[in-house]
């Protein structure tokens, strides 16, 4: 399948990869027709999805299954007057119905909004009205939370005309699975005036910002091709071997690791539909299903290590990656000791596919994001807008705004889009520095930087140092006001089981940071908390912690 879109698939070196990687984008590229139906025609019995849940249920789907079921769903949605350009919100956790619905909407030319089960009625009202959502497809969890929130929101969501629930029935809702059986498993690709083009909008992610209301990131139908680099060259998926990325369908990480690039490459998805993250349960599933390539956020690796990761047999895992937050050298080294594998960190945003990563042609350095992906024109610029020298901190930018995989703007917001692409580049809002070997090292979000007594301190380095201490489960570093120094470093810490807050613990952690990193970076304030405030996507709300300190 890759040969249809890549003039070259194999590369001799990273330099060869950066210089010669190209993607052919058909004018009418459509993931549903060209990839799912394409594989179904070529190898109908090829495994595409292996799904299981916490209740012992298990289902497998070939490409032929996904092709036929998505055709039925497309015909079903069409009967409900959902078509090209209509916006549909899917709140389906990790249910197998997500893949069927997402592929069906792709074939229709509709615009998909993935959303999390944690949305409240307020969140739904904002999203539905901002994007003019026409229909919603939801999972009926046991307590009926999301359906109840949706019902509470509906009076203030005038554009929503259709609501579908799966797998249980509920008054006032249509069902998903049962009606599909009434529809044909053939669905014709539209041509002429109603043709779906690669440049048409396909997908909207609501960014989970730590401040302000979420923005609507819009990607076009060519976007899945941008994730070939994500899947094949960073996650290094293997054709016909299971890949797992840990993510709920409501987040961009799902698009990164559980559908687009992987299925283009012919690597079947392993989907464990867990009701909540229990590290022991996840590790049992990785072991049971012999997952070959695995990717998860560093926080999950920390919890897995704390739960006894070395007690499981992970001999099937051939490649291990992480994303979503920077990986500390401490976690890198512990995972390597247990798995015998180096961790391949990747960096990107809801606005992109992978931007910077550790690729197969060079050894990962513990704590480094790796090197730039091709096509984007990644660079670092200083406050004057000039390219940074090696060792100089700067903002990460993408110079090639036409790169496949990069977002096309913020939905229905010309002003915000214009600001995002000011100067003909996309400014990620993240800060890093580059070493003489070309590796990039994450520093922090621009608004998270701490200025203390003339020093500029990034939170990640201090968080990495603290995380190396056995007492620390999670931590967040922010600035706190100080009359003499302007700001000082504050650590908000969640302790591991068996450790208790005390003055002695404060001093022990402070001394640990002084020895691990530059002494001026140690946290002068340490607050112990039972949990860190996070966005619904799991990102730490440093702004909330910082604002509390100033208040």
Image (spheres, rainbow, N blue to C red):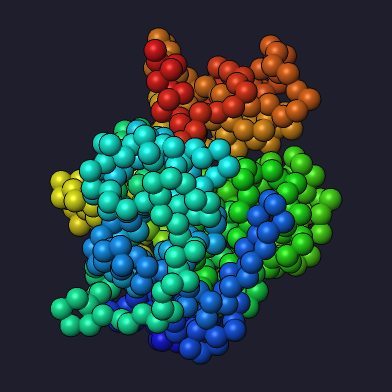
Q: Nearer the viewer, residue 216 or 522?
A: 216
Could you say where residue 428 lies in the image, as x and y percent from the top left? 34, 49
Q: Is residue 161 visible?
A: yes
Quarter of the view holding residue 19: bottom left
Relative side of 148 to 315, left or right: left
Could you say where residue 260 lies in the image, as x and y percent from the top left? 46, 68
The C terminus sits in image quarter: top left
Q: As displayed, is residue 538 above or below residue 34?
A: above
Give the residue drawn at x 29%, y 45%: 128
Q: Nearer the viewer, residue 11 or 502?
A: 502
Could you say where residue 504 lies in the image, as x and y percent from the top left? 72, 14
Relative side of 304 to 123, left or right: right
Q: Nearer the viewer, residue 375 or 254?
A: 254
Give the residue drawn at x 42%, y 64%: 102
Q: Is residue 35 visible?
A: no
Q: As displayed, is residue 149 above or below residue 325?
A: above
Relative side of 167 to 431, left or right: right
Quarter of the view holding residue 315: bottom right
Quarter of the view holding residue 47: bottom right
Q: As displayed, is residue 106 above or below residue 302?
A: below
Q: Nearer the viewer, residue 67 or 228?
A: 67
Give the residue drawn at x 44%, y 84%: 38
In the image as oriented, which residue stretches furthest toward the bottom? Answer: 42
Count how many numbered circles sit on residues in the image.
Answer: 0
Could you say where residue 541 lies in the image, as x and y percent from the top left? 46, 31
Give the residue drawn at x 15%, y 46%: 415
Relative side of 36 to 447, left or right: right
């Amino acid at each position: 399948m890759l040969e249809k879109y890549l003039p070259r698939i194999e590369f001799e070196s990273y330099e060869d990869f950066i210089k010669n990687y190209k993607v052919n984008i058909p004018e009418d590229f459509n993931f549903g027709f060209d990839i799912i139906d394409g594989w179904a025609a070529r190898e109908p019995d090829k495994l595409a999805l292996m799904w299981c849940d916490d209740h012992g249920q298990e289902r497998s789907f070939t490409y032929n299954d996904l092709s036929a079921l998505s055709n039925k769903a497309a015909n079903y949605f069409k009967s409900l007057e959902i078509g090209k350009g209509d916006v549909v919100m899917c709140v389906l956790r990790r249910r197998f119905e997500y893949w069927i619905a997402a592929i069906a909407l792709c074939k229709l030319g509709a615009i998909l909004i993935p959303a999390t089960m944690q949305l409240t009625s307020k969140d739904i009202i904002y999203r539905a009205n901002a994007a003019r959502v026409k229909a919603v497809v939801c999972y009926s969890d046991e307590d009926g939370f999301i359906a109840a929130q949706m019902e509470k929101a509906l009076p203030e969501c005038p554009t929503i005309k259709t609501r579908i629930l799966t797998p249980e029935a509920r008054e006032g809702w249509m069902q998903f699975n049962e009606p599909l059986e009434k529809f044909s498993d053939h669905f014709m690709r539209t041509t002429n005036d109603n043709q779906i083009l690669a440049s048409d909008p396909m997908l909207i992610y609501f960014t989970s910002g730590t401040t302000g209301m979420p923005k609507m990131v819009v990607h076009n139908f060519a976007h899945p091709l941008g994730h070939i680099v994500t899947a094949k060259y960073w996650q290094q998926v293997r054709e016909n071997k299971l890949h797992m990325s840990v993510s709920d369908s409501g987040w961009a990480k799902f698009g990164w690791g559980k559908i687009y690039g992987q299925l283009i490459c012919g690597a079947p998805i392993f989907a464990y539909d867990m009701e909540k993250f229990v590290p022991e349960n996840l590790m049992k599933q990785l072991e049971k299903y012999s997952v070959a390539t695995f990717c998860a956020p560093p926080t999950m690796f920390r919890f897995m290590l704390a739960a006894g990761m070395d007690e499981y047999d992970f001999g099937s895992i051939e490649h291990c990656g992480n994303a979503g937050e920077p990986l500390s050298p401490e976690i890198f080294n512990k995972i390597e000791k247990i798995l015998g594998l180096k961790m391949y960190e990747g960096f990107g945003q809801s606005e992109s596919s992978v931007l910077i990563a550790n690729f197969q042609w060079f050894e990962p350095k513990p704590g480094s994001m790796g090197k730039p992906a091709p096509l984007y024109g990644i660079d670092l610029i200083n406050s004057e807008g000039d390219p940074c020298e090696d060792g100089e901190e700067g903002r990460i930018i993408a110079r090639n705004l036409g790169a496949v995989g990069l977002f096309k703007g913020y939905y229905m917001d010309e002003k915000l889009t214009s600001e995002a692409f000011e100067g003909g580049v996309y400014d990620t809002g993240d800060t890093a520095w580059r070493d003489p070997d070309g590796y990039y090292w994450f520093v922090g979000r621009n608004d998270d930087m701490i200025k203390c007594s003339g020093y500029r301190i990034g939170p990640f380095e201090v968080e990495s140092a603290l995380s190396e201490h056995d007492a620390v489960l999670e931590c967040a570093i922010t600035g706190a006001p100080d009359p003499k120094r302007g700001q000082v470093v504050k650590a908000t810490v969640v302790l591991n089981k068996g450790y208790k807050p005390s003055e002695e613990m404060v001093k022990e952690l402070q001394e640990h940071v002084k020895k691990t990193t530059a002494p001026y970076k140690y946290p002068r304030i340490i607050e112990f908390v039972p949990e860190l405030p996070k966005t619904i996507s799991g990102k730490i709300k440093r702004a909330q912690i910082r604002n509390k300190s100033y208040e």
